[in-house]
Image: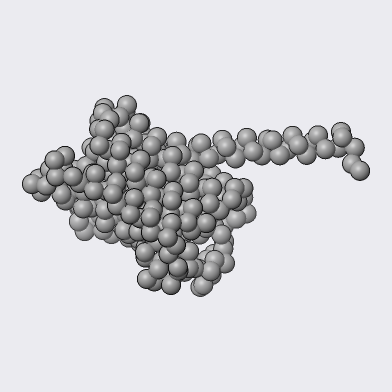
């Protein structure tokens, strides 16, 4: 029987690990919540494609030396090339670009809610493309989430006659669908390297594609960027993307598989509050009701999958 004093260091280590995990989780939620707010600030000065290209390049510049220093930088194998391609194109290019462009027309708080409908589309997509069974609880979750969407687009509160509003909301919804494609493929992929080890390569590929798109669609890069936009892009690339993803990777290894997705649902709630305070967007009661309804639907679906 081990001595009581021998058990104390182990208990302290477990306690310290739990505290650090909670701290990292809180960091992820706050970092990703602020991402939406600061990106809204960035697109006031920088065009959407260049904004996404700059932040993705900054993330790559942080990730490559960081993983090299940690001896985690690896050349991707041929088997991992498809997942690099899919995540880079559908998440880092399509989702990020469409979402950022949508922020030009849509308040950050509304874009946050629409962006976080992504998990609602994952279950049906996985059913059609991966043959995964959809549980009754997942169906209920999708139905509840769609009810939340209907609240957002209720004719009495949504400007259906405003082309710019329709365009902006459409961009954000298509962005959410693109993200779901990335998630579904990621679930089907058999990883050889870890997601963190592949992330710098995804950022590099995405940066190349984004620069080409930005040059083609928006012209030359901005020659002058004001301090607020520069700080916003730096935050997006370094903290929101590079450090946020690293912290989430650590959390995913320490908590049960169903806990992490449910915990991340705090992100849109915090983001709505931050956008109300920092961007002075106010709190629309319908938006709050819609957000909570959608999050309940996502939580139901996540538990059903678990």
- For the point 53% across and 40% down, the residue is 25
| Quadrant of the drawing holding the N terminus | top right
Q: Nearer the viewer, residue 202 or 151?
A: 151
Q: Is residue 26 above or below residue 259?
A: above
Residue 137's x, y, as percent?
Answer: 43, 56
Residue 48's x, y, as percent?
Answer: 25, 47
- For the point 59% across and 47% down, the residue is 255
Q: Which quadrant of the view contains residue 277?
A: top left
Residue 241's x, y, as percent?
Answer: 44, 46
- For the point 27% across and 41% down, the residue is 110
Q: Is residue 230 above or below residue 187?
A: above
Q: Nearer the viewer, residue 235 or 253?
A: 253
Residue 43's x, y, as percent?
Answer: 25, 41
- For the point 74% across and 34% down, the residue is 12
Q: Nearer the viewer, residue 113 or 168?
A: 113
Q: Is residue 135 above or below residue 20?
A: below
Q: Please indicate, yes or no, whether residue 24 appears anywhere in the rendered image.
A: yes
């Amino acid at each position: 029987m081990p001595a009581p004093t021998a058990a104390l260091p182990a208990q302290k280590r477990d306690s310290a690990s739990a505290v650090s995990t909670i701290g990292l989780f809180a960091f992820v939620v706050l970092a990703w919540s602020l991402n939406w707010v600061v990106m809204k600030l960035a697109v006031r000065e920088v065009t959407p494609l260049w904004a996404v290209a700059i932040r993705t390049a900054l993330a790559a510049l942080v990730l490559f030396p960081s993983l090299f220093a940690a001896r985690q930088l690896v050349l991707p194998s041929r088997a991992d090339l498809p997942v690099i391609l899919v995540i880079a194109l559908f998440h880092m290019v399509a989702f990020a670009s469409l979402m950022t462009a949508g922020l030009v027309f849509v308040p950050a708080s509304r874009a946050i809610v629409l962006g976080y409908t992504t998990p609602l589309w994952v279950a049906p997509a996985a059913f059609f493309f991966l043959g995964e069974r959809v549980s009754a609880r997942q169906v209920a979750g999708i139905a509840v989430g769609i009810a939340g969407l209907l609240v957002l687009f209720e004719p009495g509160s949504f400007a259906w006659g405003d082309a710019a509003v329709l365009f902006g909301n459409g961009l954000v919804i298509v962005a959410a669908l693109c993200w779901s494609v990335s998630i579904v493929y990621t679930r089907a992929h058999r990883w050889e390297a870890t997601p963190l080890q592949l992330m710098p390569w995804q950022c590099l590929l995405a940066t190349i594609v984004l620069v080409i798109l930005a040059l083609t669609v928006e012209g030359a890069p901005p020659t002058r960027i004001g301090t607020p936009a520069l700080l916003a892009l730096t935050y997006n690339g370094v903290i929101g993307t590079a450090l946020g993803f690293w912290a989430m990777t650590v959390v995913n290894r320490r908590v049960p598989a169903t806990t992490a997705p449910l915990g991340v649902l705090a992100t849109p709630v915090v983001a709505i509050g931050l956008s109300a305070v920092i961007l002075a967007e106010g709190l629309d009661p319908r938006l709050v009701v819609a957000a909570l309804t959608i999050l309940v639907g996502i939580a139901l679906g996540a538990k059903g999958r678990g």
